[in-house]
Image: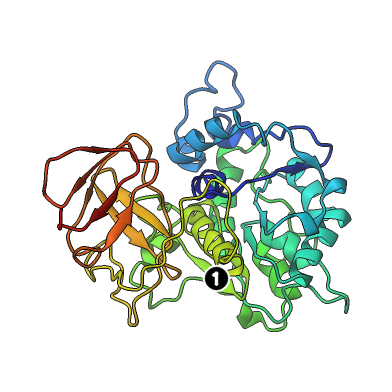
Amino acid sequence: MPWRILVALGHRVTFATPDGRAAAADPIMLSGEGLDPWGWLPGLRKLTLFGRLLRANADARRDYAAMLRDTSFNAPLRWEAIDSDRFDGLLLPGGHRARGVREYLESERLQAVVAAFFAADKPVAAICHGVVLAARSKRADRRSVLYGRRTTGLTWALEKSAWQLTRLTRFWDPHYYRTYPDGTGQPAGYMSVQQEVIRALADPQDFLDVPASSPDHRRQTSGLSRDRDTDLTPGFVVRDGRYVSARWPGDGHRCAREFARLLDEKYAARPVAGAVRRLHPKNLVPDENFLGFPNPSPPLEFSSLSTRSPQSIGLTGPDQPDMLCPVGATLRLDVGVAQKGTPVEFRDCPAAVSGNESQQRTGPQRLGSGSE
């Protein structure tokens, strides 16, 4: 989903693989087939129970199917061809299956690339095992680029729960969910993502998990709830400077939006090809009850349109997650989103309704909240 979100916000995404050939996701994680105790039997493999729980959710599978048709995805760079000077930011995805992800985590070339982005103070996002790659990337002083920073990553609690389940349900391949199993004499979890990352930090307390005081703590830590376009509350990310990290795919929407905000903050003065035109009216103030946005003081400078559902539209600013209105949607501009009479530009929305009026408008429109 980070690919979809970034492209929707007007960013151009370039992929990179070891040999310049298009990548492919783990088919087990896409289908869930092979994650049940009977999954080794050809005739029963397609009957999924635990597999449905552990596989990618419907949103992720939909986005992956769309990404397979993307031109850039099908023409990736080779790792050796990555030039950090040519790119504005770097996103490090995750993955756990040892035979697929170890090459990624252990690549000295990628570690050098990651270090170059950090050295240039460019936005970097890392999810799940992607944080391990960042932890292994060294600065000029040979310390990790994460040394002195705060981060999160796949927690041992999440990794252990999935591993303990799959070593029973996929008993013929008990370490499927562990990229690096613990060695003889090592304590449980020593080779986990969390513990390896902690060993690279200046202080173990710099590895952060959901605080116990979080009102959504149960949803954020259960491993059963994932954030979505319409609900970011299950997600958890940590931002330190121009670096943002997330624990697992369930944080993906929030992480992608935070990464997009990092890009906007660093390159705000430079137009982004294909993006919604940036708006900076000083008198736009979001309603304190609209989409849960706080009422800021002073008012934020807003940059793009936002919608949480096909029926309502809002505005986002530097401190809020961004989302574009869906193409083909009929949208309603809620009274209270912007002060009365403030012009708001709709882009890529074929039809819109102002306030409670029923008059349909087509094409890019400039509308005032409840004033036309």
Which residue lies most toward the top here? 43
Q: Which residue is pictured at 62% across the width and 46% down the height?
A: 12
Please state which amino acid type lies under the numbered disc 1. Val
Name the quadrant containing residue 303: bottom left
| For residue 145, side relative to residue 37 (left or right) | right
Which of these two is toward me, 364 or 165? 364
User: Taking 234 as reference, is 140 above or below it?
Assistant: below
User: Taking 189 as reference, is 72 above or below it?
Assistant: above
| For residue 277, side relative to residue 370 (left or right) | right
Q: Is residue 185 visible?
A: no
Q: Which residue is pictured at 81% across the width and 47% down the height?
A: 103
- Residue 79, horizontal then vertical, whole percent: 83, 46
| For residue 23, side relative to residue 361 (left or right) | right
Q: Which residue is pictured at 60% across the width and 37% down the height?
A: 170
Assign a secondary structure to mark 1: strand
- Residue 205, horizontal then vertical, whole percent: 61, 82
Mark 1 neighbour density, 10 Å: few (under 14) some (14–19) many (20 or more) = many
Residue for badge 1: 238
| For residue 308, side relative to residue 111 (left or right) | left
